[in-house]
Amino acid sequence: MIAQKNIRNFSIIAHIDHGKSTLSDRLIQNTGRISEREMKDQILDSMDLERERGITIKAQTVQLQYVDGNGDVYILNLIDTPGHVDFGYEVSRSMFAVEGSILVVDSTQGVEAQTLANVHMSLDANHEIIIALNKTDLPSSEPDRVCKQIEEIIGLETDEALMVSAKTGKGIAELLEAIVLKLPPPSGNEEAPLRALLVDSWYDAYIGVVIMLRIVDGKVRKGMKIKMLATDATYTVDRLGYFTPRMVDSEILDTGMIGFITGSIRQVSDTKVGDTITEDKMPCDAALPGFKPSQPVVFCGLFPVDNSLFNDLRAAISKLQLNDSSFTFEIENSTALGFGFRCGFLGMLHMDIIQERLEREYNFDLIITAPSVVYRVINQNNTVSDIYNPLDLPENMSGYRIQEPWIAATIMIPEEYIGDVLALCQGKRGVQTGMSFSGKCAVLEYRLPLNEIVFDFYDKLKSVSKGYASFDYQLAGYEDGDLLRISILINEEPIDALCMVVHRETAEKRGRALCEKLKTLIPRHMFRIPIQAAAGGRIIARETISAMRKDVTAKCYGGDVSRKRKLLDKQKEGKRRMRQFGSVSIPQNAFIQALKLD
């Protein structure tokens, strides 16, 4: 049993690619938690997707054991967090489970947008922050410049900033000593009834639901009957322990510890992230504040290619939601695609990851509809309705006001790319709210409509800045917008999967581009197929796929021309009737490819 004063709980926060996961590897290696044979790069990135893309998607925890110069033993509970803006909810959850943060800043690149956002989250959680400048072994490292940048942009003192290299192991011993000396131990009452925070949960095919929890007060023991305060569900603890990073069993988890429990939990809905866990017989007096619920900002439809697999897809999505509480879904019906789900995500990367996990882990072939954001429609009686699906938007907007979500964006770029980035933001209807400089780095502040950035803004930003720009944003409320719904009609039948909302100024351009793209994606049929884009009660663009045609006059050698005309008229009438009753076969990939417009 370890004394509470010898426990340290902390997270590692940083911008993408600043070295969080590699630093975690060195801390694990330096404390000898696992053997050299078991050690591998980015050991806490357990998912194949994380290793392939080189990003952290899920926050992971590991318990380290550290012995200081006096021989005192310390338990260090480390949480490695994601860096991408789409997984900011994972970071914010981790913050409330620990007392301190290690802020990792790349000493070659300096402060970037997500660095700033993560520091604000850490300060909101009242954390003690240790600054570590990484990659100091590189010739291009500029620690003095980066320290000055941290003081100017973030406002933190850098007198005690540590110079480390996660790659070579330089400065790791000093960092471990700083964690013990500077970060506070957890404050909790060991004698009080059990009160634990449900930090995360995931589904295991063999043991059911696994819960990761932080013990705030009291203790949890094997065989204890626990209760979830939010759902009133009760379970008996079958197994408990901690991560090294593999699961190691224990008989008890003391106050201030981070670990896991299982209890033959089969109901996904019983384990709500942020819930308070207590003992059933001796409940705690008050629940913990929990987490601020995540707000999905991008919505799209997910449909199985084979509609008979709808129930299997529902089961897979439910299990995936347990592992990622920021992902939401509800059932919807499409005339073109059958039954599916309207899903909410924190961003386009989040959507891409969920889609790929469903395809890889559960072997589903999926069709994804056009991504959309949440709009608000206000009628003449000032009644406000939230619109998650563009199809629900009124065709005729007279008498209605429509509002769209806006964001407050922070863009950090080298000053030579300012002109191109300003032009990009203005083209997306952006409004500049501020600009400041730190050395050769510019910090731009913009207000942008969320609908304009969900498709391709980040890719274009990286393109115009040669990859040097960094981008972070926060939701900044709703504003009135001059918006229209574009409906795509194929053979005069509306295709709801391709319905989208755009600004009036770009409606015609967008409609024409969609029709032209669909013309190349839909194969020719035996009859002529019109492709139309409609907005505001009128057709704004049209393309026609010509019919496959058999030469019915091939066997006519000579003779009167009326004979050929009769055959051609008969063929024309047949195609007219075929178009009236025939159905158009649209390939699966057409739905996604049509949305990838330049």
Image: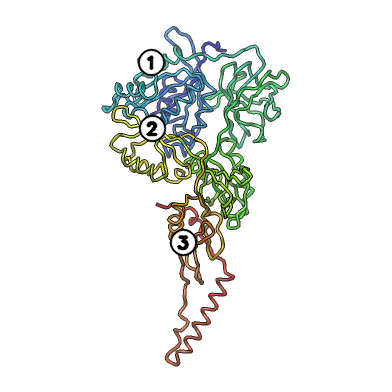
Number of disc labels: 3
Where is residue 353? Give x, y as percent. 49, 41
Residue mark closest to the camera, 3 vs 2: 2
Label 3 residue SS: strand
Q: Which residue is mark 1?
A: 174
Q: Which residue is mark 2?
A: 434
Position of residue 332 measured from the top left corner of the image (x, y, whole percent)? 62, 49
Q: Which mark is residue 585?
A: none
Secondary structure under badge 1?
A: helix
Q: Nearer the viewer, residue 315 or 363?
A: 315
Tag 2 near tag 1, CB within 8 Å = no
Picture layout, residue 240 above or below residue 464 = above
Amino acid at pointer 2: Gly
Q: Is residue 316 visible?
A: no
* Mark 3 and mark 2: Cα distance apart in space: 39 Å
Query: Label 3 vs label 1: CA separation?
Result: 65 Å
Identify the amino acid type marked 1. Answer: Glu
> Considering the image in quadrants, where does the N terminus appear?
top right
Front tag of 3 and 1: 3
Q: Which residue is mark 3?
A: 541
**Mark toward the start of the polypeptide (3 vs 1):** 1
Crowding near the residue tagged with mark 3, few <14, some 14–19, many ≥20 C-alpha atoms within 10 Å: many
Q: Identify the amino acid type marked 3.
A: Ala
